[in-house]
Amino acid sequence: MTKELIINAAPQGVEIALLEDKKLVELHSEKADSSFGVGDLYLGKVKKLIPGLNAAFIDVGFEKDAFLHYTDLSPYVRSILKFTTEAINDKSPNGADFSKFRVEPEIVKTGKIAEVLNGRPNILVQILKEPIAAKGPRLSCELSLPGRFVVVTPFNDIIAISRKIHSSDERKRLHKIIEAIKPKNLGVIVRTAAEGKHTAELHEDLLSLVATWKTIQTNLKGATPPARILSEQGKTTSILRDLLNEDFNRIVVNDKNIFADTKSYIQRIAPDKADIVTYYNNGSPVFDSFGITKQVKAAFGKTVNLPSGAYLIIEHTEALHVIDVNSGYKSVSNNQEQNALETNLEAAEEIARQLRLRDLGGIIVVDFIDMKLAENKKKLADAMDKFMRPDRAKHAILAISKFGLMQVTRQRMKPEMNINTSEVCPSCNGTGKISSTLILEDEIEKNLSYLIMQKHTGLTIEVHPILHAYLTKGFLFSRLSKWRRKYKQRIKLKVNSNYHLTEFHFFDDSDEEIKL
């Protein structure tokens, strides 16, 4: 699998597209004035305790107070409170030596928040979920600083190894290395990417995170809540940190500053990969050049079409997301069960992509096409599990219910990606909306292919004059000529000025309209 990262910088912010085998799988946006992003550290002030919810509202500077539940308090929250007070009042020129910090006893899991945050103190917190709709950010006191190979967790001396590293010898080796280089009062979680890495690489990554923790101490000096103490790295850097591997073969950037920063970061973490970063300056928008704009228009609508002719309907409610799978009008064979299975498997792959692409979180209910055989239901469940594995968000998939529904839960940490894919209709002066014109050509060819497969001959396509000019532009190399050569058919194109811009109809050799 090849991976490409396309970065589009604009005045309003940065858009980042992740392509796997030329297919768009993730789309991230970072606004120029971004704040309260996942991973950001804030100095907050406890505003209100809610004993009934066993939670507190914290002022971190957002228009609505942030939410902190008791279960999101770190076992070491008393240490965090003590550290926060000491760091704010620290007068030493170089800052206190954190290795000499005396850690307080852990809190009990079943305690009450009023017992811990009594007195409404200042507290260092980390953004767990970004503000969504009318809700403020959700906070955590489980502080963590992620690096490429390790994650540092202050106020403990724990060493943990990723479960995805299965070799017992490798786990022992990594544990021994970290034990030798780990500072006191800083726990370390070894990430999967650390497998096979040398001591020097792990040490460098750890030293970088220790320096970050020192920066946090410095920023806390004399701080008054609410205040941002540390921002998570930019989206580009964090994506590279988490995803960069041997499969990445190209990173394209259209901004000189981001290009320089990206190149510098890659040279630091993976020098052998530095040459994959390229600067784009070809005049046309970078997303258009790599076909991303078209993929976005095709993927973010309410209806998502699949290559076979099947389609998905994606609906959103306050409580959950609902996805309906429809077979459309095309079928491969007369075996209904087999058709249902093939359509469902195709839909499952696209649904897994859609969850990553739109960053859908919470409860997702999928209404697959009904299947009778238990073995086919299991095949579908196994396939869904396989397609969801590359997803970095925590998720759980339940088996298909008796009603043919599959329930999926997916971690939600930020608002879902929502892009308007409709355009103002030129034939009604903006009173109605139509599907994007970018995918119109593909829609016509998809229907043409189906009709030819159904043994239709002498086909005529009637279109709007502007669309006719577009399809016939270039004579021998026009879209129409390409279709004729591809399908070895004498396909005609006729103009109908009564049609609106995106309207088209098919007629047979008797000039009878073919209803699709």
Image: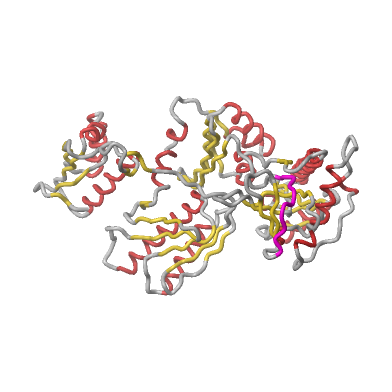
| Rendered location of residue 328, percent (x, y) | 30, 58
Q: Nearer the viewer, residue 428 or 249?
A: 428
Q: Is residue 196 visible?
A: no
Q: Position of residue 269 (x, y in %)?
A: 68, 39
Asked whether 12 or 194 is in front, the reply is 12
Residue plotted at (24% across, 40% down) = 483
Q: Main secondary structure of the magenta part?
A: strand
Left or right of 119 on screen, residue 3: left
Residue 485 x/y as whole percent: 23, 39
Residue at 42% in and 56% down: 315
Q: Which image quadrant for residue 226? A: top right
Q: Is residue 271 above or below residue 138?
A: above
In this image, 59 relative to 249: left or right?
A: right
Residue drawn 54% across the image and 62% down it? 409
Q: Kindly indicate the quadrant of the structure image that contains residue 344.
A: bottom left
Relative vertical location of residue 362 with respect to residue 479 in this rendering, above or below: below
Q: Which residues are magenta?
A: 41-51
